[in-house]
Amino acid sequence: MQVYKFGGASIATPERVRALLPIFEEAPQPVIAVISALGKTTNALEEIVAKACKGEKDAAMELAHNLEQQHLDYSKELLNDASYAKAKDALDVYFTELHWGIDGASAERYDYSYDQIVCLGELLSTLIISFYLREQGFPFEWVDVRDVLRTDDTFRDAKVNMEYSQKRAQEVIGKLLEAGKCVLTQGFIGSTADNASVTLGREGSDYTAALMAAMLHADAVTIWKDVEGLLNADPRLFRDTVKIEAISYHEVIEMAYYGAQVIHPKTIKPLQNNGIPLYVKCFLDKSLKGTVIQNEVRDATYPPIIVWKQDQVLVQATTKDFSFITEDNLSDIYEIFHKLNIKINLMQNAAISFVACVDRREDKLQKLIAALDVNYKVLRNENVSLLTIRHYTPEVVFDLTKNKVVLLEQKTRHTVQVVVM
Ligand code: ASP
Ligand code: MG
């Protein structure tokens, strides 16, 4: 059994969906398709949430109507008249849920309200695609994944109850597969024991695909993307990227840790624990070989892998009386970061100062600086970037930093990190 994951870009337009048919034709049977919301729907839903929680319910409702119309137009273009009529009835149910979500939204329960609204993107997209696939002769069963994935109530970042979810996956999806059916379901969403909808964190569909694979003992997962495979750098930021043919789970975890937005960071663990390979393939040209992510890659030699984290701030705390930074100071400083839930992307301490590179989140930074200011003199450098290069060579480091001011540099055997301005 295989799990195929399709992201928002792969189904952004009806033409794109039509072009996926050969992939479904050749899919080894049975297959579970895990699908994201259409194109940028999740962003649009986030805007609706923001308005609804501010109390601007009419404005939220207007945005909702636009989004609904887009889904109807899309369905009309994709489906024949008979399937369109059925799809419209099915979609209506979720449009009503959207209106309820807007009515009930409040700033006090922002994250809860967010999940009740944002979860609908995946429900709408999967319904439309399931009608299309059935119309084209692919008998996919549509499953509401909220009946399968049970989570806690950490809204927007829900933690999955694996034991319960696995039992449900076997009862609901396993049965369909045994009966020779294929299954189509939503990525990114789940539900609590009280039947509230939840989301698993942005871009969480990869993670859903991995969970399904682990719970149902799949042979492999394939993530279909608009790039050739896993590249050594973000092609939107760098020219001359190279595709990596095979890479270990470990290496991908390292990349995600340093901020590469390739695969949702939680995806790897369930696959690694179960030894399930993950393929990254291109939906625009399925004949391309793609990348395989697996346990050990024998004699692996990787190209320099580059992760460029923008929107960083470098914060420096210096003792006010020029005393040395001791373990005592460090423990105080870490406590402050920990309490404010601020992730340190890079840090270094010197005789009388401590430096940390963090994401630019103005609200959190204000609090951080106020807390550090009690005992330290605080300086900050705005608008810096953090460049991480795994498997670096001196030439690559030189090349990537040559026109920049280097504020901080750290090297280990495999990794160099540079804060630049
Ligand atoms: N639709 C969600 C998002 O855009 C989940 C996903 O695409 O994986 O974040
Ligand atoms: Mg996506």
Image: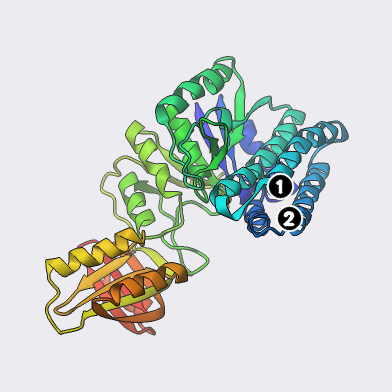
Q: Position of residue 43 (x, y in %)?
A: 63, 56
Q: Where's residue 287, x and y in %?
A: 56, 44
* N-term-proximal mark, 1 vs 2: 2
> Does the residue tagged 2 have its C-beta within 8 Å of any atom of ligand 1?
no
The answer to whether residue 95 is left or right of residue 249 is right
- On the image, the x and y values in percent for residue 32 come to 56, 30
Residue shown at 46% from the left, 57% from the top: 261
Question: Does residue 412 appear in the picture of this structure?
Answer: no
Decide: marks 1, 2 in contact (CB < 8 A)? yes
Residue that badge 2 annotates: 57
Type of the residue with mark 2: Lys
Secondary element at tag 2: helix
Separation of residues labelled 1 and 2 (CA atoms): 7 Å
Left or right of 173, for residue 216: left
How many residues crowd around disc 2 within 10 Å: few (fewer than 14), some, or many (20 or more)?
many
- The residue that mark 1 highlights is 103
Identified by mark 1, the residue type is Asp
